[in-house]
Image (spheres, rainbow, N blue to C red):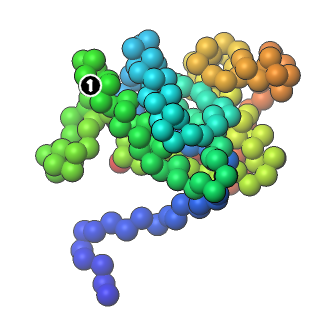
Amino acid sequence: MDRPKGVAVPNYRRWRLEGGTFFFTLVTYERRKMFVGPLARRLLREAMVKVRRIRPFRQLAIVLLPDHLHLLWRLPENDTDYSSRLGGLKQSFTRAWLAAGGQEGSVSTARRRQEYRGVWQRRFYEHTIRDYRDFKRHLDYIHANPVKHALADRPRGWPWSSFHRYVILGEYDAEWYGPVELPGGVDIEPEQR
């Protein structure tokens, strides 16, 4: 059967791995720099706690930048459902953000009818971590990201990152910074659509 004209079909399939470790990127709508203020950072932390209480996961790493965040999560054994966790995180944050007077971008009438708000981009980027080397490469990418975006000259200079915890654990020297590129030149920060 032919697809109706104008109907987009995603050209990707998400890999589900029970108890897996996953790398995610979530981006704000229109790349709005909402996380520069303490209110948005606090509401995001509260939303994360709320989701984790309902649907447990282990947060292995995070970096929060003005308009996006990267996460490394491990799901519980026999669980593959990261989509509802990320959806719950976005939904919980959006409700709290708007209730607190936070601004959103303008959305079309069609998007509004579908109950989309102008706070987050609709999709997220996901990568299933395959082995320790892959984990380490993504961990380094997360921690080097503030330098990539010229927000700090070293990862230690960016306060909203799990880098500081990993220094205490001995994974990194406090002065660490190495350019990090992921294999295949994949852009892991989705463009605005």
Q: Residue at x 27, y 36 (%)?
A: 118
Q: What percent of the width, then of the height, locates residue 128?
A: 65, 53
Q: Mark 1: give few (<14), some (14-19) or many (20+) Cα within 10 Å.
A: few
Q: What percent of the width, then of the height, locates residue 31?
A: 39, 32
The residue tagged with tag 1: helix, strand or loop?
helix
Give the amino acid at mark 1.
Leu
The image quadrant where one finds the N terminus is bottom left
Q: Residue at x 25, y 22 (%)?
A: 99
- Give the left or right position of residue 180, taking residue 44 as reference: right
Q: 184 and 138: which one is in front?
A: 138
The image quarter containing residue 188 is: top right
Q: What percent of the width, then of the height, locates residue 160?
A: 58, 19
Q: Residue at x 78, y 29 (%)?
A: 178
Look at mark 1 in the image and give the residue it sits on.
98
Q: Is residue 62 visible?
A: yes
Q: Residue at x 59, y 36 (%)?
A: 71
Above or below residue 21? Residue 96 is: above
Q: 57 and 101: which one is in front?
A: 57
Q: 16 and 68: which one is in front?
A: 16
Q: What percent of the width, then of the height, locates residue 183?
A: 71, 51
- Give the left or right position of residue 107, taking residue 79 as reference: left
Above or below residue 10? Residue 83 is: above
Above or below residue 20? Residue 92 is: above
Q: 120 and 151: which one is in front?
A: 120
